[in-house]
Image (cartoon, grey):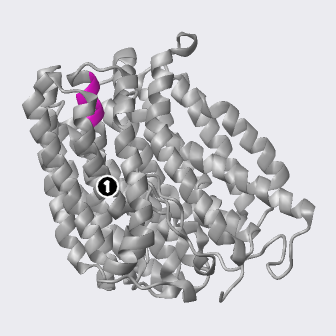
Amino acid sequence: MTSQKPTPTPSTAPAAPGADRRRWFALAIVMTAAFMDLVDVTIVNIAIPAIQRDLGATFGAIQWITAGYALAFAAGLITGGRLGDIHGRKRLFLIGVGGFTLASALCGFATGPDMLVASRILQGGTAALMVPQVLSIVHATFPAHERGKVFGLFGAIVGLGAVSGPLLGALLTQWDLFGLGWRPIFLINLPVGVAALLLGRAYITESRAPRALRLDLPGVVVAIAAMLLVMYPLTRGAELDWPAWCFVTMAAAVPVFAAFVAYERRKARRDGSPLVELSLFRVKSFAAGVAVQLTFGIALGIFFLVWTLYMQLGLGWSALRAGLTGVPFSIAVSVAAGLSVQKLVPRFGRRVLQAGALTMVAGIGLYVWEAERYGMGITSWQMALPLVVMGLGMGLVVAPLTDAVLSDVPREHAGSASGIVNSVMQLGNALGLGLVSVVFVPDGFGRAVADAFTGALGWVAAVLAVVFVVMFALPARPRQHAEDGDADEPDATVPAPAAAAHADADADADADADADAEPALAAR
């Protein structure tokens, strides 16, 4: 290791029994918070039809309930981590947990779609304060020789969140606890959040980065403005029959984005702490990898929402049946993710990721064929095969992708690069959710939804084909980074949620390569 974060117990000496218990309690607390965030991403989609019926939400509002969270999370990731470096990771973690819990309560008691959308955006913003601190706290709490085991536990937690989120959402919606309908999917966070707050104050040790970059709040504001100029017309355009202002607004995003790039360049020259380190895009594999992350996130954002609507609004299935139908997919992702990192990528390199993209395309083709063959009488068992094929393909991509993207990045920029990759994945997910109203336009319920679903799958397959082609720019065999040491900015290396909501991020993090185990967990 080339640098050592402040730790409550020196890594060169065994921890005292009391200190050892405290740090493992601290680990349980931050892992619980990470699990809460992961589940909250995956739990919502399955309840979307129930929310739409209860609140009378428009399709645009439904898109914002999911996309608003991802957009706020993406916009706040790097800034949230830097705030922890400057003001203390424990402090920012507790602020994030408190805000996330409050936002969950507001979601659960929302009286209309506007309040729910605003509360979901608040959830995403507070998650961006909470989640980046998790692995930073691990770095500050555990010596290097124990981190491999800790990162393995994180992989298991992420996999559990991927599998349990949709099923838990289905169960809570189906049970209609206390006559609350879908609301318990948010209210379940309240006791968990309160417990994390109380226990976190007692067991987590405060730490700060020895060299923390300055905040770039103007950069955040301009970046969010550019995102909203694209997202808002995408979600509203179809409902309003695409008035001229939608196209004008999207076109305005181009100069705003150009202004963001110009500002970031000036910021880098002035004080060396831009929100986005633009020099990273001179690295071919990184630039291509960011494009892969963005397009892959778009594909997943489209698929998961239209899939849920297809099963419940098209086929008329209950939330529970829809949730159970997705279990084979989640299990396949988990199995393939572990296999790709541990066995396949070390041997075959980039070809594993490309095979994963093509496998997902094959699964989509199989799904379209079965949906057209069996029509409205299709069963969960008949969906299992295409879902397993898609899940295997996704698992081959999500776990090793971040390491492949970061393999040629200079060591001093590893933290910033990882933060960009994670944020771009979330942005892609948000854009995919926004594009749903473009590629999925049913003119009714039942059969009309089923037909629109198969049409949307064609678009997903096309995006994945682009992903396959862009992957040729990734390194043939990603290098190992064990020698790179700890990044000075652990804020950026966070378990990215998935947006890819069902992604398993289980990686075989070696104890000697803890600095690169973090990016391996970055497919949320």
Let me know if residue 178 appears in the view.
yes
Could you tell whether 30 is left or right of 14 in the image? left
446 versus 368 height, above or below: above
Image quadrant holding the N terminus, namely bottom right
- Coordinates of residue 397 in the picture (x, y in percent): 33, 63
Let me know if residue 442 appears in the view.
no
Q: Amino acid at mark 1?
A: Leu
The residue under the point 28% across, 57% down is 393
- In the image, which residues are magenta? 307-312
**Is disc 1 placed on a helix, strand or loop?**
helix
Q: Main secondary structure of the magenta part?
A: helix
213 versus 227 height, above or below: below
- Coordinates of residue 131 in the picture (x, y in percent): 58, 55
Could you tell whether 72 is left or right of 235 in the image? right
- Coordinates of residue 160 in the picture (x, y in percent): 53, 46
- Dividing the picture into quadrants, the one containing residue 225 is bottom left
- Coordinates of residue 200 in the picture (x, y in percent): 77, 49
Give the residue at mark 1.
Answer: 392
Image quadrant holding the C terminus, namely bottom left
- Dividing the picture into quadrants, the one containing residue 227 is bottom left
Tell whether position 141 is magenta: no
